[in-house]
Amino acid sequence: MSTPDDPELQRGLEDVLVAETRLSDIDGEAGDLTIGGFPVAELAADATVEESVFLLWNDRLPTAGELDSFRADLAGRRAVDEAVHAVLERAADADRGAMDALRMGAATADLAGDADAETAARRLVACFPTVVAAYWRYRQGEDPVAPREDLGHAANYLYMLTGEEPDDAAVRGLETYLNTVIDHGLNASTFAARVVASTESDVVSAVTAAVGALKGPLHGGAPGPVLEMLQDVHEHGDPEGYVRETLEAGDRLMGFGHRVYRVRDPRAAVLSAAAERFYEAGGDGDFFETVTEFEDVAVDVLAEHKPDRRLDTNVEFYTAALLHGIGVPRELFTATFGVARVGGWTAHCLEQFADNRLVRPRARYVGAHDRTWTPVDER
Ligand code: ACO
């Protein structure tokens, strides 16, 4: 029995309620996700990124006029300072990964001197694609492509990556992805942002911390390895052998399992449908067949491997398939997740500021007591 003096240890804060939010709601048993009041499938299929971000920040959809001015405002904040370009170029030359570059870019977003939290939030959402795309161009030994204000948020991101205007299928596929993962309860990166915001620090600091949290393979770092796994199986066949070998080696199968869901992640359903549409419309259909076959085999073998813990497909599995099909390089998968999630992170910061309580949990001390100090020359 826990008491205030001796509370029960909640490793990983599992199931501990620490905030109220109106941004997204997860039912892990049923496999339902609601974002801004909409079932994820509905928002993902119909919204532009600008509408999703507006929805999270304002708790309602914009009118046509509001949407036009919101779009124009974000588009006008896409460019980043020359000094930021220099950092990104240096990051690319120094062989740093895209998430490191995104962290560096995010941290410079307050160079613009935005006066209030919502303007800083707008800047962060607007400039994330520019930071990732510029880093990628430098990494390829090419000049960055300047953002175009006449393109939507998703289309402009793809345009800055390649220098070519993307087709509608790619834009819709990316938009579906960005909407699907824009927010997801109190995941590790969102919690990191809220912890920083709760100290009454600023949005740029909070989002920079969130980028660091997203980088890890247990959170946002999985889709790159998922693609490698799928490509390996596509090339060599034998998905069952691959899964069994991975598990026998004591490794986790990337793209499966979730802290909250005990069924298939609903985002996997949205993204698999989007990927199917995309691949049917002219992608590598054979590769997509490998993907779906792998999922079926993996879920069966994981059930055998862990009969008492349902391990099903998580969002990262179809993220890898969809982003690969659209042409987003594997090295940018996690950073592209950040491009989406910054909408949620900033919304959580605004929510935290509006009803703040410093986040300050406790740790159970398991170290020594009453040690006697020994001067250094006597040790
Ligand atoms: N492959 C094999 N075994 C697994 C997997 C997996 N993907 N996931 C969980 N397990 C096993 C664990 O080894 C553990 O076994 P044990 O009890 O014998 O030690 C058991 O299932 C329970 O796992 P937990 O660690 O308690 O699960 P947790 O809730 O901490 O993990 C996580 C969730 C981190 C996502 C985990 O499932 C995992 O590592 N998956 C692979 C990485 C991945 O896909 N990450 C992306 C997550 S989605 C997102 O963050 C956006």
Image (cartoon, rainbow, N blue to C red):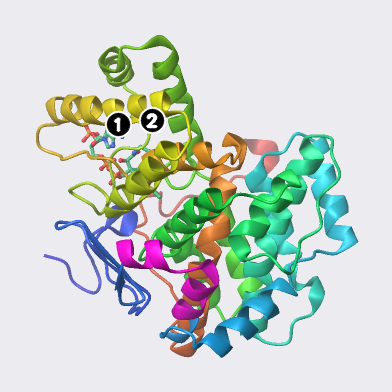
Q: Residue 131 sits in which quadrant?
A: bottom right
Question: Of the residues shown, which amino acid type is indicated by label 1?
Answer: Thr
Q: Is mark 1 within 8 Å of ligand 1?
A: no
Q: Residue at x 74, y 67 (%)?
A: 78
Q: Is residue 201 visible?
A: yes
Q: Is residue 30 left or right of residue 71?
A: left
Q: Is residue 306 left or right of residue 323?
A: left
**Highlighted magenta segment, given as a residue range:** 40-56
Tell me the quadrant of the picture where the C terminus can be found: top right
Query: Label 2, label 1: how many angstroms apart (C-alpha)?
Result: 6 Å
Figure quadrant, ligand 1 = top left
Which one is nearer the viewer's eye here, 194 or 78? Answer: 78
For label 2, the residue is 288
Q: Is residue 284 left or right of residue 104?
A: left
Q: Residue at x 80, y 75 (%)?
A: 112
Residue 337 tag number: none
Q: Residue 243 sits in which quadrant?
A: top left
For disc 1, the neighbor class at 10 Å (few under 14, some 14 to 19, many from 20) is: some
Seen in the picture, residue 232 relative to 262 is either above or below; the reply is: above
Q: Residue at x 40, y 43 (%)?
A: 275
Point out residue 189 in the picture as x, y percentages from the top left corner: 48, 59
Q: Residue at x 25, y 27 (%)?
A: 298
Which one is nearer the viewer's eye here, 171 or 353? Answer: 171
Point out residue 245 in the picture as x, y percentages from the top left corner: 31, 14
Check if mark 2's residue and mark 1's residue have beta carbons within 8 Å: yes
Point out residue 162 in the picture as x, y percentages from the top left corner: 72, 44
Q: Helix or strand or loop: what does disc 1 sit on?
A: helix
